[in-house]
Amino acid sequence: MSGFQDARALPKDTVLTPDLAIIGGGPAGISLALALAESGQNILLLESGGRTFEADVQKLYEGSQTGVPYIALDGGRLRYLGGSTNHWGGWTRPLDKIDFETRKGLPLFGWPFGRDAIEPYFSRAQSLIEAGPWVYDEAGETNSDNGPLLRLGPGGLYTSWFQFSKTRDNNLPTHFGDRYQADLAKAAHITPLLNANVTAIRLSPDAGRVAQLDVATLSGNRLTVKPRYTVLAAGAIECARLMLASNDVMTAGVGNGNDLVGRFFADHPIPRNVATMVMFDGAIAPIYLNNVARPDGAVMRAVLSPRPEFMRAHGVAGSLTTVENEVKLDPFATAAVVTTAQALGVDASRAKAYSLGCGMEMAPDPDRRLTLGTERDALGMPRLNLHMTIADDDFTLFRQTLTELGRQLLAAKSGMLHISYNRRDEWLEAMDWGNHHLGTTRMHSDPKQGVVDANSKVHGIGNLYVAGSSVFPTYGSSNPTLNLVALTLRLADHLKKVMA
Amino acid sequence: MTRRGILAGLVAVLAAAGGAAWKFRLFAKQYPPTPYDDLLGQIVDREPAIVFGRAARKSMPGAAQLAAGLRRDHRSLAERAAAEPGEAQIAEVAGWIVPQSVALYAALAAQA
């Protein structure tokens, strides 16, 4: 069997026996299936939705929330082929080397390997997300065709670079379902099964292996899948839900012997208008304000990043600060600018001000977690509750980074900075989120500290793996798609070996 | 003397008077003398400094103590403001990151 199938149309109680079942047809699941297409293994790609958005399918994502206000659980992700790439913004950037390090003063930070472990996969991941040639921070000063880079004094921040995913005809960005459905359809050993909701992972009696998957459709059909290997690729919220809800053999849930599944949920906080940056001469290169296409096809935007040396020295987490749009200064702000510029001996008669945005890294928090609720969805699966937190330290550390940016502008006599928020309630009032769901099946070599090992295999279960950003033990500030695809390609290489 | 000559002379006199008024700040706002005029004189434009200084002075000592502290550093405001960001001598005033001396001089201006 290959080519797209619809679970609603299969005979009731069909039993499928693929070599590999991939649960979830988003960027991780599709990348994994395509990477293994020539492996000779029969792959079943189980996608809950169809090829387009359907409200009753999306409703399966609903859940409840406590703690800090956060986006509704059915609001930040999409349940159909292509998953959340169907609404992503296309911002792309590799994690930095420091994002993988254990960090002094920042408990729970660090991966079981360095960036060099996924470095070989970045090129193919870049190609899959169609972000053009690999440039990023190698751009350095070469983007000066788009105007001079921001003049900063020596210090903790520098101009770094985002790139953007783009599909043919320059449409931003790549929707994995649309883009790769033809490749999936023609792959001899891949069967994408639509409208197929995995409702339980059934373990062997000794809990050492996945024995079968229960599959249900909203139309009432029931199927069974008995795969040799299984990869969960359903996103950080749904992976945790399925593991927690599959509790007939392991009573705390699959892979949850150490009460870690669903904990450490994270996202990138993106509070709006975090600061106002004044340029004394009014000038800023357009590439800070807008995405700019280079002749080589890379679509880029300049942002401000903390240097690893600064992050280590001051114990700050990652952040990416963006320049958003020109704003007007009030009389007090004008007085601040005139007084400072005159003291520095700088002409500020043409000064302009710009609002700044950001993407912040949160520190891992075990209490920021997903748990099963009492309500059930249309398929009988328990809905989730998310308890959301954000620590005061997360704001304090980012504030240190902004202060350093202000200092560097003054040192260069190029401008100055106003930080918008001081109190927790001010930060929360301005809060938005990246919809980058991370961390709920975190990776760690020690089963007491992580759900999956360094190969993304669930500790203690021989044939169950997790792909996607749920395995990120710490998060960096880069958007996750490129990185989760690279990590998935690494998993594909591992599976080729173990499944052979 | 021709009418053109008279007009040219008049323009020259007015220009000289304007220049002198600008140079000696005849139309600038006059401030009563203070014991800190040696310091306040270094502020190019005192009005915005006073506005900014009202926020800066909230966490500062009184004018006399402030002035004494400023006089202990023998550098001018301009020298200090240029050097301090490189020395990590910065202050935050109502969210604005400024050289420490700018906050101190502005606070003094608001109190004087």
Image (cartoon, grey):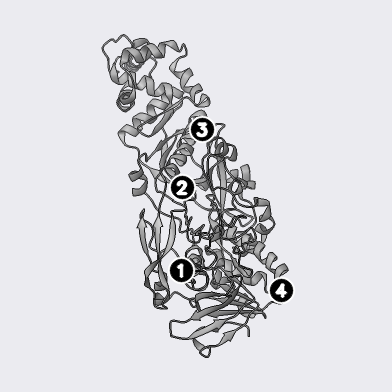
Q: What element carries label 2?
A: strand
Distance from the alpha carbon under mark 3 to that under mark 4: 52 Å
Q: Which mark is in front, 1 or 4? A: 4
Q: Where is residue A405 in the image (x, y as percent from the top left)?
A: 49, 36
Q: Is residue A209 above or below residue A267?
A: below
Instruction: Specify the subunit that label 4 lies on.
Output: A
B110 lies left or right of A140: left
Q: In the image, what residue type sits under mark 2?
A: Cys
Same-subunit check for callouts 1 and 3:
yes
Q: Quadrant of the N terminus of chain A?
A: bottom right
Residue visible at 46% across and 41% down? Answer: A398
Q: Name the residue under label 2.
A: A358
B76 lies left or right of B57: right
Q: What element carries label 3?
A: helix
Distance from the alpha carbon under mark 1 to that under mark 4: 29 Å
Distance from the alpha carbon under mark 1 to that under mark 2: 24 Å
Residue visible at 41% across and 71% down? Answer: A382
Instruction: Specify the subunit that label 3 lies on.
Output: A
Q: In the image, what residue type sits under mark 3?
A: Gln
Q: Which mark is in front, 1 or 2? A: 1
